[in-house]
Image (tube, rainbow, N blue to C red):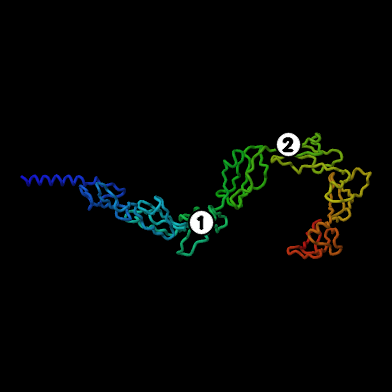
Amino acid sequence: RSSLVILSLWIFISIEATTQDVCPEPPKIENAQISRDSVKSNYSNGDEIDYSCNNGYVSLRKITYMCRNKKWSQHRSAECTLKRCELPADIPNGHYTIINGNSFVVGSTIKYTCEDGYQMMNRIFTRTCRPGGWDNQLPVCEEVSCAADVPSDKFLKMEGLPDYGDLIRHGHRLQFSCTEQGYALKGPKEITCQSNGEWDEKFPHCEEITCKLNETKDFGDKVERISDHVGLIKPGHQIKLSCVEQGMIIRDKRPIICQENGEWNIPFPKCEEAKCVANITNMIIDRRPNPGVIEQKPGETIKVSCHQEFVLEGKKDITCQEDGEWSSQFPSCVATTCEPPPTLSHLNADTKLFLDSKKTKYSLEEKVEYACFQTYIMEGDPFVICKQGTWREQFKCIPPCLASVEKMDKRNIELKKGGRERMYCPHMDHITFVCQKGTYKKGNSVQFRQQCLYGEMTLPECE
């Protein structure tokens, strides 16, 4: 019985002591868990527990906590941080950029991109940092090349192809032209291989040059084509048009020709009412004086006469024809006399006039003499002639070349004969200059001997 009492007392004391030394539940550490070897149901004073970082995390030192006086205290200060991957590998002709995260730790993703002129050969071109390192294989960048898919066109000439077996690289150009006359290039004259391995434009082809003609659209319902050709209309071919309705004409008589560029030489003309038109000056038409503009219908005949002091040149009876043209060249009334000859304001020259101041009328073909003022040279016959009521001059007065002392001083020149004085040189004459003292001929200056032509002369220059 005494032994039982002693045993019970020992158990009580042990339980009491154990209860007093037990630590609470171990602390929870971010991104870590208690190591399997440290797991116990109770932790007493002096017990240590180790923590292991979760997958993808690491700590610089071992994380350990100790039970002391019913409390947990960190034995070694450390924490679990994301595991880092080694620096990503570079690839030839490409580079990478971070597209997820901001450093090379677990969960970060990088993307590989090829340089211009190269293309990605892998379907997957990203790599992510995993606990075991970078996933996926390194992608490969291969040089871009364009295919020379030459059209089967016997008239197409292509220049710029590389030697057989060489790649057509990014930036390479091909030029095209047509070898056969009568064919034009449809499409670009030049194409360029792009960085994606595609040409910037489609290959051209050679197409036979023809002029397009849509009779319904181009002519309408009043104009028709006189059919003299079947098939394509090629350069050099002419077409003829006529009007559908009677009494209508095409006044523009110019030929309509298909040109080398496949365009028509003129716009298609329109049909208009057939009529003959004339501007009347100093005339009497069917006894009507100066009617201005007259319009006559086909078949109508008019009689033409002139006012006094005018004479008729041409036929006095003229008929309007079906084609809207007069039966002969329309006549004109020509003055039989001229007023006194023009003064200086009527001529582009400095002149003086020799005439009878009392004379007020001059006959046809009568002449009056002029002379150029001093320093001007006359070119041509020195007369004006009365023709069809107006004076017609057959000469002109050509001015001399002039240069002031100030103008020559700016160019550091003077006259070889005469020195520093104003220059005067008649038309067609020559004159020689020299440099002023202390100056020399400028490198790009004209020669010192110059000719006056129609009042113009280029001056030399010294410096």
Q: Residue at x 85, y 61 (%)?
A: 420
Q: Position of residue 138 (x, y in %)?
A: 37, 58
Residue reaching furthest front? 2
Q: Position of residue 302 (x, y in %)?
A: 77, 37
Of residues 448 and 132, which is closer to you in this image?
132
Could you classify mark 1 by the number of other residues whose Cα lies within 10 Å: few (under 14), some (14-19), or many (20 or more)?
Answer: some
Could you classify mark 2 by the number of other residues whose Cα lies within 10 Å: few (under 14), some (14-19), or many (20 or more)?
Answer: some
**Residue beneath label 1, please?**
192
Residue type at numbered disc 1 = Thr
Q: Residue at x 56, y 48 (%)?
A: 230
Q: Which mark is residue 314?
A: none
Q: CA distance from mark 1 to mark 2?
A: 65 Å
Q: Secondary structure at mark 1?
A: strand
Q: Is residue 303 above or below residue 60?
A: above
Visible residue check, residue 402? no
Taking the image as shown, residue 61 lies to the left or right of residue 324, namely: left
Q: Position of residue 389 (x, y in %)?
A: 85, 44
**Residue beneath label 2, please?**
296
Q: Is residue 390 above or below residue 110?
A: above
Residue reaching furthest left? 1
- Res 20 → quadrant: top left
Taking the image as shown, residue 169 lies to the left or right of residue 271, namely: left
Taking the image as shown, residue 261 lies to the left or right of residue 4, namely: right
Of residues 195 and 157, which is closer to you in this image?
195
Visible residue check, residue 272? yes
> Of label 1 and label 2, which has the lower sequence position?
1
Of residues 403 and 284, which is closer to you in this image?
403
Q: Position of residue 240 (x, y in %)?
A: 62, 46
Taking the image as shown, residue 94 lies to the left or right of residue 417, namely: left
Of residues 50 and 172, which is closer to you in this image?
50
